[in-house]
């Protein structure tokens, strides 16, 4: 039996055992599942996706009725997941940046305030925060008749926030074109200014120029085409508001809780990024005579971002995954409507869980591809 | 001849210590700084006085019924009356001493683990014995102890049981997964990578749904897990992937020379891992592991969605009691405080460990 002492042989043997054990387990599970499904009379296959669902969804960004199919339910759920994740990521980035910078402020009170914020919200489960916003804060809003009103166009009450909805008339396409033109122009200006800086050393105010372009060009288009954007204002009719855009308490509770919770992690990432920059870098920038703004923009931030962005992107992914906690308050995202209601209606747990988990996996893979691309781009270029 | 002229004395240097100087330097050094200070004071002003008023000044502490809550503030009587529910759930009154004893033993084990002077053997022994003793105490069925079904466990007790079992069971699985991922054997490596990345790519709630809805399909008729066991399986399998990634971080921090030295000594793979690599890898990974355990502790609240009565779900349950309707706010604040205390203590401990390990590694 001396050949068993050979590392290679043993390696192959171990792997064979693993494969056999794994295959046996898979077969065992498949066999049991098949029997259980038959015994319980559960349907199989993906036909149910074409059957009408028979239930309604409270808020749907696309056309949806009780006659719509389970595939439509999936689409509604996925789009709602992406909507709340998008708003959450934007808001949490802004809040996290503010808190992270405040944490490093030389002002003692500001820095303590930020630290308290971080330590408080990071250590309370996000599900508790979602429920708190939903059951305590938003439930305490006034009734529809006594809504808080801002400029008579934004209303806040128990049923959510009602805001004016823009209606794009003919010609508004030109405004979109103006935005695109401004972006392209801005890119060329950026290139040109960089080239000129390298050749002559003269600087050009790229940021303010581009910002001005981005505001002025669409404005010109707006007036030139005869103001093609109207607003549909919410109006109180009977027991509820009509018209405008409504953000439901479910959406708001989820959004606020995810934003506030995730911002604590983003703030910490930003702080550790800035703290990771060697002190000598700051001193060297000072010695070169750079102003405080210049040293921040040209020396500190480019290095801090390299450290801070990877954890921030994984926090974005966490936010997307945590949006599934909406199941506890009933915001109709993927897990609530598809892995919840559709699953209960059809009973096809295997197929539905596979689709749901697969969807999250695809999102995760996309996010990690972005992360890899970023890491590659930001790698210190050693010559 | 030079005439000596008396020069006027220089002013003493500006005082660079003391409270006045500190305030000037840290709060009022520039106009923008002053503005920031005023802004923060305003934020504090709009948050703290109303909260203090609600939680203490206008709050009711004494009494036994809803009628005793007369103030505008918080009704802490509700918490006091329902405290047993929050901490133990439906655990039967007559057997409550068992739950209390379990918690005390848990606290003792934690104390052993944290205090440096306790010998390592005692630490490890107490961690290994705790789950067995706890199970016997909580479930019963032997030594004349009455059986208390897990469906009666609830509140903080259940949260702690889930967190502890999750931590203890996911740890060895996580180590094996991490070793698998580092392995040179392609099939074992692929399986480990797939498992870890799959779990990390999906939300915990979907894993819990799998465990509670799909898992029973995987076993023959008649094999039945209770709800708690399903949740524990889900949480453990989920947690193991994250533990594995922490341990992998530890593996990567170990210099290659350690592996080579172990090989040169003629150690087998398992000897090398057990005696050389793992002890160092785990030590490096501990701060991150504590971070993962904090996440786990927060994540236990998700079991409420699959119908277990953990600490968080007690809020809704107690606030829907007909005699105590509408005290959600007090419930959420109280429960948040409990979660916060546990997590904050853990994160402080992890910071302390990090510092300790840091100095150890310095030459």
Image (tube, rainbow, N blue to C red):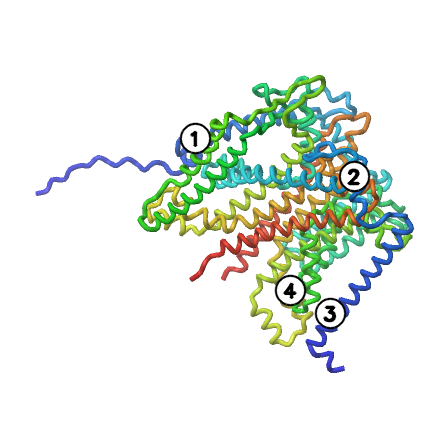
On what subunit does the disc labeled 4 rest?
Answer: B
- Depicted A251 relative to depicted B60: above or below: below
Closer to the eye: label 1 or 4: 4
Q: Quadrant of residue A334?
A: top right
Q: Is residue B205 above or below residue B223?
A: above
Does the CB distance between marks 2 and 3 fall below 8 Å?
A: no
Label 1 sits on a secondary structure element that is helix
Residue topped by disc 2: A341
Q: Which one is in front, A344 or B287?
A: A344
- Whether labels 1 and 3 belong to a single chain: the reply is no
Same subunit: marks 1 and 4? yes
Answer few, some or many: residues within 10 Å of disc 3's Cα (few below 14, many 20 plus, some between 14 and 19). Answer: some
Disc on res. B122: none
Residue where numbered disc 4 is placed: B182
Say whether residue A64 is left or right of residue B91.
left
x, y (%) of residue A203?
34, 44
Note whether B134 is above or below B35 in the view shown: below
x and y percent of residue B256 in the render?
57, 68
Whether tag 1 and tag 3 are in contact, CB under 8 A, the answer is no
**Residues under labels 4 and 2: Cα distance?**
41 Å
Q: Quadrant of the N terminus of chain B?
A: top left
Q: Which mark is residue B34?
A: 1
* Marks 3 and 4, how far apart at CA: 14 Å
Q: Earlier in the sequence, mark 1 or mark 4?
A: 1
Mark 3 falls on what kind of element? helix
Q: Residues within 10 Å of mark 1 (few under 14, many from 20)?
A: some
Residue A300: percent from left, percent from top: 43, 47
Q: Residues within 10 Å of mark 2 (few under 14, many from 20)?
A: some
Tag 3 subunit: A
Residue hosting label 3: A15
Spatial separation of the CA atoms under disc 1 and disc 2: 55 Å
Residue B172 makes an appearance in the image: yes
């Amino acid at each position: 039996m001396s050949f068993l002492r050979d590392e290679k042989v043993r390696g192959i043997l171990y792997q064979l055992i693993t494969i056999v054990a794994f295959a046996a387990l898979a077969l065992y599970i498949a066999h049991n599942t098949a029997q259980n499904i038959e015994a319980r009379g559960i349907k199989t296959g993906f036909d149910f996706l074409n059957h009408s669902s028979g239930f309604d969804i409270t808020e749907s960004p696309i056309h949806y009725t009780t006659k719509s199919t389970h595939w439509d339910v999936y689409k509604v759920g996925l789009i709602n997941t992406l909507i709340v994740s998008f708003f959450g990521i934007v808001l949490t980035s802004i809040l996290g940046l503010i808190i992270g910078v405040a944490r490093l402020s030389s002002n003692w009170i500001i820095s303590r305030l930020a630290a308290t914020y971080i330590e408080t919200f990071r250590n309370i489960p996000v599900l508790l925060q979602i429920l708190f916003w939903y059951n305590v804060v938003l439930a305490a809003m006034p009734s529809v008749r006594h809504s808080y009103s801002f400029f008579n166009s934004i209303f806040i009450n128990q049923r959510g926030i009602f805001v004016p909805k823009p209606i794009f008339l003919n010609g508004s396409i030109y405004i979109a074109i103006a935005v695109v033109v401004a972006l392209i122009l801005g890119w060329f200006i950026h290139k040109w200014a960089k080239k000129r800086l390298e050749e002559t050393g003269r600087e050009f105010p790229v940021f303010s120029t581009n910002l001005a372009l981005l505001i002025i060009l669409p404005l010109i288009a707006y007036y030139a085409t005869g103001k093609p954007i109207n607003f549909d204002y919410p109006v109180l009719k009977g027991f509820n508001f009509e018209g405008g855009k409504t953000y439901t308490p479910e959406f708001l509770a989820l959004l606020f809780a995810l934003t506030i919770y995730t911002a604590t992690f983003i703030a910490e990432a930003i702080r550790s990024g800035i703290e990771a920059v060697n002190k000598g870098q700051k001193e060297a920038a000072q010695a070169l005579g750079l102003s405080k703004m210049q040293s921040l923009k040209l020396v500190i931030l480019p290095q801090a971002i390299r450290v801070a962005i990877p954890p921030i992107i994984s926090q974005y992914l966490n936010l997307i995954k945590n949006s599934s906690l909406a199941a506890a308050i009933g915001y109709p995202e993927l897990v609530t409507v598809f892995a919840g209601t559709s699953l209960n209606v059809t009973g096809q747990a295997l197929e539905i869980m596979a689709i749901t988990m697969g969807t999250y996996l695809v999102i995760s893979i996309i996010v990690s591809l972005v992360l890899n691309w970023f890491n590659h781009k930001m790698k210190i270029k050693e010559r | 001849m030079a005439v000596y002229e008396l020069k006027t004395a220089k002013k003493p240097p500006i005082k660079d210590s003391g409270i006045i100087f500190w305030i000037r330097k840290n709060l009022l050094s520039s106009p923008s700084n002053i503005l920031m200070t005023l802004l923060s004071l305003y934020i504090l002003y709009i948050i703290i006085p109303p909260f203090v008023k609600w939680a203490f000044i206008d709050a009711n502490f004494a009494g036994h019924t809803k009628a005793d809550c007369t103030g505008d503030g918080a009704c802490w009587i509700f918490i006091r009356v329902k405290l047993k529910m929050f901490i133990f759930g439906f655990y039967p009154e007559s057997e409550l001493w068992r739950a209390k004893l379990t918690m005390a033993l848990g606290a003792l084990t934690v104390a052993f683990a944290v205090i440096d002077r306790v010998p390592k053997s005692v630490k490890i022994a107490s961690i290994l014995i705790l789950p067995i003793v706890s199970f016997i105490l909580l479930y019963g069925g032997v030594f004349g102890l009455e059986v208390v079904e897990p469906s009666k466990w609830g509140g903080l007790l259940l949260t702690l049981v889930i967190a502890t079992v999750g931590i203890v069971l996911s740890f060895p699985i996580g180590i094996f997964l991490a070793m698998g991922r580092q392995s040179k054997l392609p099939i074992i490596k692929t399986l480990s990578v797939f498992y870890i990345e799959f779990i990390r790519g999906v939300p915990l709630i979907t894993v819990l749904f799998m465990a509670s809805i799909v898992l029973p399909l995987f076993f023959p008729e008649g094999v039945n897990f209770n709800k708690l066991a399903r949740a524990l399986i889900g949480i453990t399998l989920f947690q193991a992937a994250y533990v594995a990634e922490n341990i992998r971080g530890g593996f990567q921090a170990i210099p290659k020379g350690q592996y080579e030295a172990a090989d040169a000594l003629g150690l087998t793979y398992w000897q090398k891992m057990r005696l050389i690599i793992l002890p160092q890898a785990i030590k490096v990974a501990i701060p991150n592991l504590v971070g993962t355990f904090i996440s786990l502790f927060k994540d236990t609240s998700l079991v409420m969605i699959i119908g277990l009565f953990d600490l968080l779900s007690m809020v809704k349950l107690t606030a829907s009691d007909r005699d105590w309707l509408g005290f959600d706010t007090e419930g959420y604040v109280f429960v948040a405080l409990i979660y916060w205390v546990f997590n904050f203590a853990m994160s402080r401990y992890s910071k302390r460990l990090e510092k300790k390990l840091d100095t150890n590694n310095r030459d």
